[in-house]
Amino acid sequence: MVRTLIIALALALPGVAAADFSGGIEFLAGFGVGAESEVDGKSVDGSDAWSAIAFGIIPGIDQMLAPSVGIGAEMGFWWFSPDGDNAKGDSQLVLSPHLRARMSFPIVEKVTFDGMLGVGPTIWTSRDVEVPGGGNQSTDSRFGWSLRFNFGGSYAINDQVSAFANLGYFTTTTYGDDITATLNTIPLGVGVRGTF
């Protein structure tokens, strides 16, 4: 559905060929992870329980609408690992399908500046949490929204394939059960993309 929408939009714009797609995969490791929670409207600090590194894998596709601007979609798979004295249980898997806009400006011969902004829904999958007195309890899945942006550069290995690296920001917020919860990270990403 998203690809059909991108193709239809691209064909409606003059001068855009159907072969101006780029797809890739990005691997991320985040630091500076923080957490915020509100229970019945009162702020609760959970940053000490979510201070470990976050990892992510994001496949994505873009349709270049102009030489420097494109729109597309991505599917984020994020793992947030609890840490600290209050941390109990498994890593939190967060799924974040995004619509995104990407800019790409040539700097020198094979080097390009890249910038990206993506926004969309988010799903915090259920996870096992240790409960006082021993044993595990499974949490419910939670739904909300997420936002990601980054800036970096890419290097053209050949006419079809580029390697890239970037630094960005990712935030995800969920709602329900009178609890609003947010996880944040500043990820470093590396990956490859190809045009077709």
Image (tube, rainbow, N blue to C red):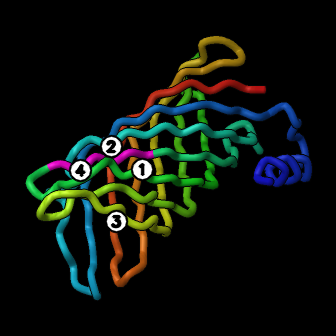
- Residue 7 located left or right of residue 135: right
Q: Which residues are magenta?
A: 78-83
Work out which residue is located at the far bottom of the displayed protein and give it.
40
- Residue under circle 3? 182
As drawn, the label of residue 82 is: 4
Labels 2 and 4: the sequence-earlier one: 2
Which residue is more in the foreground, 76 or 6?
Answer: 76
As drawn, the label of residue 54 is: 2
Q: Nearer the viewer, mark 1 or mark 3?
A: 1
- Residue under circle 1? 93
Q: Nearer the viewer, mark 2 or mark 4?
A: 4
- Residue 29 located left or right of residue 58: left
- The amino acid marked with disc number 3 is Thr
Res. 46 image quadrant: bottom left
Q: Residue at x 19, y 74 (%)?
A: 44
Q: CA distance from mark 3 to mark 4?
A: 13 Å
Which residue is more in the foreground, 78 or 67?
Answer: 78
Labels 2 and 1: the sequence-earlier one: 2
